[in-house]
Amino acid sequence: MESLNESQKSAVMYNEGPSLVVAGAGSGKTRVLTYKVAYLISLGLKPYNILAITFTNKAAREMKERIASMIDEDTARRLSMGTFHSIFMRILRTEAEAAGLNKDFTIVDADDSKKIIKDIVKEMKLDDKTYKAATVAGRISKAKNALVTAAEYASSKMRNNDVASRMPEVYRIYEEYTRRLKSSNSIDFDDMLLNTQRLFASHPEVLEKYQNRFQFILVDEYQDTNFAQYVIIKQLAEKHHRVCVVGDDAQSIYAFRGANIENILQFTRNYPEAKVFKLEQNYRSTQNIVSAANSLIDKNLHQIKKTVFSENEVGEKVEVVETSSDREEASMVCSKLKMLKNRIGGDWNDSAVLYRVNSQSRVIEEAMLKSNIPYVIYGGHSFYQRAEIKDVVAYLKLIVNEADEISLTRVINKPARGIGGTTVARVAERAHALDVPMFSVVESPLQYNLDVNSGTAKKLTAFAQMIREFQAVRREKDAYETADYVVKQSGILAALDADSKEELESKKENVFELLNGVKQFVEEEREEGRENADLLDYLNNIALLTDADADGTDDASRVRLMTIHAAKGLEFKNVFVVGLEEGLFPGSAAMTDNTELEEERRLLYVAITRAMRYCVLSYAGSRFHNGKMEYFSKSRFINDIDHKYLNIKSSGFGRSFDFSKQDESFFSRFRQPSQQQSRPFSAPRPAATSTSTPLSGLTRLTHIVASNTPPQSNVSSGALRPGVKIQHEKFGTGRVAEVSGTGTDTRVTIDFEYVGRKVLLLKYAKITIIG
DNA sequence: TCTAGCTCTGTTTTT
DNA sequence: CAGAGCTAGA
């Protein structure tokens, strides 16, 4: 306890009733939670009786590790710690029968949900432009998070909302969607919450069992909980009222997925006897960073008043940099990164580049490649969303849950075995008409009078037999052996082996990576004393994994690129927040809606407060978006920050941004090696690698950007002869191989050092001659 | 049934 | 620019 300050200490030690810990950014919130758990155990509470809910699986794992080092591993292991979803899924699995589920249920991911909705919209002959899968999925998700079931939806407020936005049929889609999940014996993410709440509401004896078990409940990141989560916690805590929630209303950034900031703002109303603790000392950041962030969040009206302060050094002011384009912004970030590394001698992973939307990562990635800066991109599409991985997983899901129609339709013709769309549609039609699982129809097409020729019927039964065989293997072997068998016998591997295209090679590697993951899972389960790790356990486990949970990249010396949402809870010595432009950050929808605007402001608050000592905010006058150039102006949020904490470096639009001239004293020592300098042609490719996303960068560079860009080349065709060395804005250095055509149709063939041979139309080619 | 190649379109953040 | 959806033709 000696290492805690007074407010932290009292927050840790109070445990007679409900409490709310309002924890400002960088105020040692995780520390308080960890110590509190340890303290409770020291008071004699059994770890088994403590429920601690974190925002990500990774956060749970880290907290367990800390507790393991404070007390012991065995104690840490017995804690019920995890995300809402992972904890509730386990409860649903255990109580499957009471919850009205078959215990072999599988989980549909967000992509599959959308696919199902898309199919439904099509079948109902609704307009797919009005009823966009993503929009409808969002409505259904919102409903579930507000505990509105399909049956209740039609007469709910949400329905009125739909009518107002001219999509009155959402309720029918919701009903059909629910019916399909049920017949597939599947649940989606939101069902984990909705079903748990309903289970507790309808089965008091089950609720009581968990009330007795969870004698103390801790919830982290409470500002980002939704209504369903609030209700479930209330149900669980009803009896003993020993609940401690921790959060910061200023960091509530998940309203789009149903998070309700009112949960934290109203906590003391919901629990009138609650004690409130405020952690206001920031130990993370310099005073300038804290003050800048405070002055920004001050513009929000809707918040709990608190005074976050820092006693660290005053530090550098927060820098604001204006650039003319997204590319220039990216190269500005790169030169500053290099400068920081050279001057302070730290590590690449001291720095992070944060952005509003994932698509912004591309320009940054390209610039990093060019400057030889190692980086990792967090997020984007994760490993488990890749087609080849989803295929294997779908096989595994089908094996444990043969009712799973989503998985069935995914793999029935993968690899191609002559069962096409028409056949599958007939199977589905038959199955739904007779109210039997599709798999049954596939297995005995004749018995169900399926209208197909004998050849097709044979193909169907052969497929069913193969699945039966896999099921038999599963009964005998562990999850890894089963998965291995499936990959080899289903033909997936053979199809990837067919030819050795680079693309297939990497897919194959991914499949092996997946098998590796299964193996690792089985071994870990064994270490924990669970001998027969089953496929079902594995599938449950990966369904809840996210990119943030991926480990192994954490220690690597790389600059981190991620969205601000993904950066929640993290800290970095140096933070670059890019793209502070009206229409991007705040986004266009937020510009007219004050509630959303406040959320975006909180988002920037989160971004700035990730920084420990150095923070740069930047914006670009123009940006490539959807294939064309768009123009932006400076974000209003920059004006929200008190300028006395800012160091504004403006270059003015139109002119090219030259860093060496911009701030000579700052950069002179760290100037980049000139782009004009030629490198030997045998030079290795840039060493930068990205572990989460393969370097799509280089392959994506294959097309010449010509749309909307005025003729750029200032090079006359006369000067271009084979052998001449050139510099291209995007492709780097190269040597001319051939010049053909005349006038505006002149084409130049160039062998680039890194990206190979390209034929460019001279009038658009952004090249300069360098030798 | 399969695939190459074409047109069309475009809020964003994720357990 | 990238992804989805569609069509023609094998």
Image (cartoon, coloured by chain):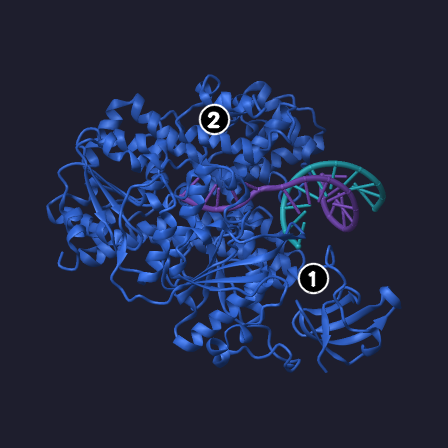
Chain colours: A blue, B purple, C cyan
Q: Measured from the top left, where is residue A130 in percent x and y? A: 62, 29
Q: Is residue C4 above or below residue A658?
A: above
Say if residue A370 shows up in the picture.
yes
Q: Nearer the viewer, residue A347 or A540?
A: A347
The residue tagged with tag 2: helix, strand or loop?
Answer: helix
The quarter of the picture where residue A500 lies is bottom right
Q: Measured from the top left, where is residue A425 in percent x and y? A: 65, 29
Which amino acid type is shown beneath numbered disc 1? Thr
Q: Is residue A57 above or below residue A762?
A: above
The residue tagged with tag 1: helix, strand or loop?
Answer: loop
Which amino acid type is shown beneath numbered disc 2? Lys
Q: Measured from the top left, where is residue A86 in percent x and y? A: 35, 41
Q: Which image quadrant: the N terminus of chain A?
A: bottom left
Residue at x 58%, y 55% (from the top left corner): A507
Count of numbered tags: 2
Residue at x 64%, y 79% (from the top left corner): A676
The quarter of the picture where residue A223 lies is top left
Query: What residue would you read off at disc 2?
Result: A182
Dot 1 and dot 2 residues touching (CB under 8 Å): no
Q: Is A704 displayed left or right of A634 in the figure? A: right
Q: Chain of mark 1?
A: A
For the residue carrying disc 2, how many other residues have a C-alpha within 10 Å: few (<14), some (14-19), or many (20+)? Answer: some
Q: Measured from the top left, where is residue A216 in percent x and y? A: 19, 39
Label 1, label 2: how many angstroms apart (C-alpha)? 46 Å
Residue at x 56%, y 67% (from the top left corner): A331
Q: Chain of mark 2?
A: A
Q: Is residue C9 above or below residue A501?
A: above
- Residue A702 tag number: 1
